[in-house]
Amino acid sequence: MRIIALTGGIATGKSTVAGMLAGHGAAVVDADRIAREVVEPGTPGLEAVVAAFGRELLTAGGGLDRGALAEIVFADVESRRRLEAITHPLILARMAGEVAALAGSDAPLVVVDYPLLFEGGHQTEFPDGVLLAYADPATQIRRLRERGGLGDAAARQRLAAQLPIDGKRDLATWVIDNRGSRTDTRQAVDAWWRDQVATRDHVEARRHAAGRDHVAARDPDDPMTAPISDPTRPRDGGVG
């Protein structure tokens, strides 16, 4: 099973790219969804957050006031680290469980949608590669102002809490440029899927078919067709 990470920065359109990959048939493990689930009412995660930051972060319905929490953790590095120490182990454990559950899946690709991949140094856990949804900082700030209702200072504060997106671009295996229109992004995702998944799967299918034909043609009593190494198979260390 081939597993890659999908990451990005705030307002770079990572969720949009994830949705398009799912449309192609990828199985997506969504860390943002899991992050919400681990602090739902009644969970140990929410209890730990309330114990660390106070009951004033609870809404009237008993849920987490994410806006109030965001104001605290984006303004103070130590508060953000304290929150991450609570939530990250819960998120990682749930993500690992969902990936393991996909072991028998016939999906051509498993995509782990992982917002803070590079910040946590987890990129080495994805030897099949890391795909980055990219938008430059000016575009990120504009989107945060237009879609998130944030002021310029608050938007820059959000960006400062993550590694610079251009540094992430240098670390990624592949990059989807998500600065343009949704149509532009779809074309980029379609091209990436064609080159990195569909074409690869086609080559693998041909290799397997060639291997079966090669085995079927062998006569164990004929030294000219006795088993030999299959030239269609990759060498040790090669790409399968």
Image (cartoon, rainbow, N blue to C red):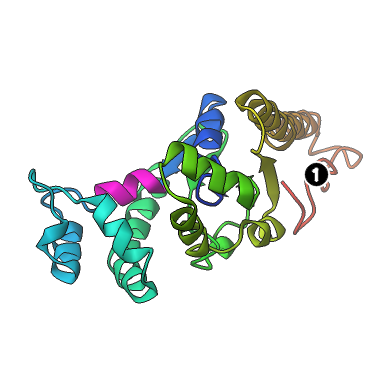
What x and y, as percent, mark residue 95? 38, 52
Residue at 57% from the left image edge and 56% from the top image edge: 126
Q: Is residue 145 magenta?
A: no
Q: Main secondary structure of the magenta part?
A: helix
Identify whether 90 is placed above or below 174. below
Q: Is residue 35 magenta?
A: yes
Q: Is 218 on the left or on the right of 35, as rendered? A: right
Frontmost residue, 130 versus 10: 10
What are the residue bounds of the magenta stretch?
31-37
The residue sitting at the right extreme is 224
Residue at 81% from the left image edge and 29% from the top image edge: 217
Frontmost residue, 1 versus 50: 50
Residue at 19% from the left image edge and 51% from the top image edge: 64
What x and y, as percent, mark residue 142? 55, 43
Q: Which residue is mark 1?
A: 227
Residue at 33% from the left image edge and 48% from the top image edge: 34
What x and y, as percent, mark residue 23? 53, 25
Q: Is 200 on the left or on the right of 26, as rendered? A: right
In the rendered image, the quadrant that contains the N terminus is: top right
What x and y, as percent, mark residue 14? 53, 42
Q: Which secondary structure, mark 1? A: loop
Frontmost residue, 85 versus 229: 85
Residue 82: quadrant of the picture: bottom left
